């Protein structure tokens, strides 16, 4: 007589396995990317700190040991010896470039008066007239064999990295280094 009906119970559907796998995959990828970002930030900060290590003590040393009263910038130069290169003004408002060696007990300071040398722009113009097909990268002060020089980094027509050194006072070419690439 009466048909028995199947009772339907309300049940929560379990998420499909594909959806759960997709969520876990996204979460794992997110964690990995976040880890790489954190690692990259820490690595960058460590490298930057090692590059600028000792700049504060160099500034203090220069101000205490010389007539420099204001320092604009400090850079690092690596030649046969490593130097901190300090840009500053002395008590007579003269701009100076100071080379402070990082090694040795008696660190002799080499000072260059900016008014008696060619500017960066002038030495780059001299270099450009000699190598007009080269690609300029950077110019920075250098000290090699107790001689104050401008170091010009560039790529030549064969796309090799090169460094050219010019005397700060008359732009006479001192030395040129060419680096050949091992891999293309």
Image (cartoon, helix red, strand yellow):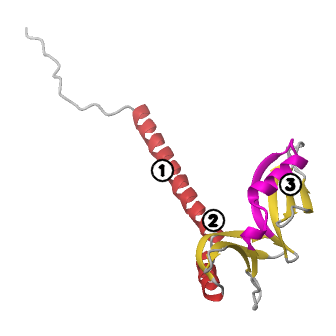
Please state which of the two labelled residues, at mark 2 or mark 3, is closer to the viewer.
Answer: 3
Q: Which mark is residue 89?
A: none
Q: Quadrant of residue 56?
A: bottom right
| Residue closest to the eye, 126 or 132 | 126
| Residue closest to the eye, 52 or 181 | 52
Up the image or down, 124 lies above or below 21; here it is below
Q: Position of residue 18 (x, y in %)?
A: 43, 32
Q: CA distance from mark 2 to mark 1?
A: 24 Å
Q: Which mark is residue 31?
A: 1
Query: Pointers 1 and 3 in contact (CB under 8 A)?
Result: no
| Residue closest to the eye, 151 or 171 | 171
Image: magenta residue range: 113-142
Q: Is residue 141 magenta?
A: yes
Please state which of the two labelled residues, at mark 1 or mark 3, is closer to the viewer.
Answer: 3
Q: Secondary structure at mark 3?
A: strand
Q: Is residue 135 magenta?
A: yes
Up the image or down, 57 lies above or below 2; here it is below
Q: Quadrant of residue 63?
A: bottom right
Counting residues from the N terminus, which is met first, the one under dot 2 or under dot 1?
Answer: 1
Q: Residue furthest top?
A: 1
Q: Secondary structure at mark 1?
A: helix
Q: Residue furthest left?
A: 1
Q: Position of residue 117 (x, y in %)?
A: 78, 67
Q: Secondary structure at mark 2?
A: helix
Q: CA distance from mark 2 to mark 3?
A: 24 Å
Quarter of the N terminus within the rendering: top left
- At 22% from the left and 31% from the top, the residue drawn is 11
* Residue highlighted by disc 2: 47
* Residue highlighted by disc 3: 162
Quarter of the C terminus within the rendering: top right
Is residue 79 among what the camera can see? no
């Amino acid at each position: 007589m009466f048909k028995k009906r199947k009772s339907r119970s309300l049940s929560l559907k379990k998420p499909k396995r594909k959806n759960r796998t997709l969520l876990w995959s996204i979460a794992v990828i997110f964690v990995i990317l976040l880890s790489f970002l954190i690692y990259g930030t820490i690595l960058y900060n460590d490298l930057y700190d090692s590059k600028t290590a000792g700049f504060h003590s160099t500034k203090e040393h220069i101000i205490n040991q010389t007539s420099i009263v204001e320092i604009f910038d400090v850079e690092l130069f690596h030649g046969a010896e490593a130097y901190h290169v300090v840009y500053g003004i002395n008590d007579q408002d003269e701009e100076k470039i100071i080379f402070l060696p990082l090694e040795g007990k008696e660190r002799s300071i080499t000072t260059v008066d900016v008014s008696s040398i060619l500017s960066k722009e002038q030495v780059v113009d001299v270099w450009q007239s000699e190598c007009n097909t080269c690609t300029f990268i950077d110019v920075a002060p250098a000290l090699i064999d107790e001689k104050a020089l401008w170091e010009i980094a560039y790529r030549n027509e064969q796309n090799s990295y090169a460094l050219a050194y010019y005397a700060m006072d008359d732009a006479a070419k001192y030395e040129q280094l060419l680096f050949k690439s091992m891999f293309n």
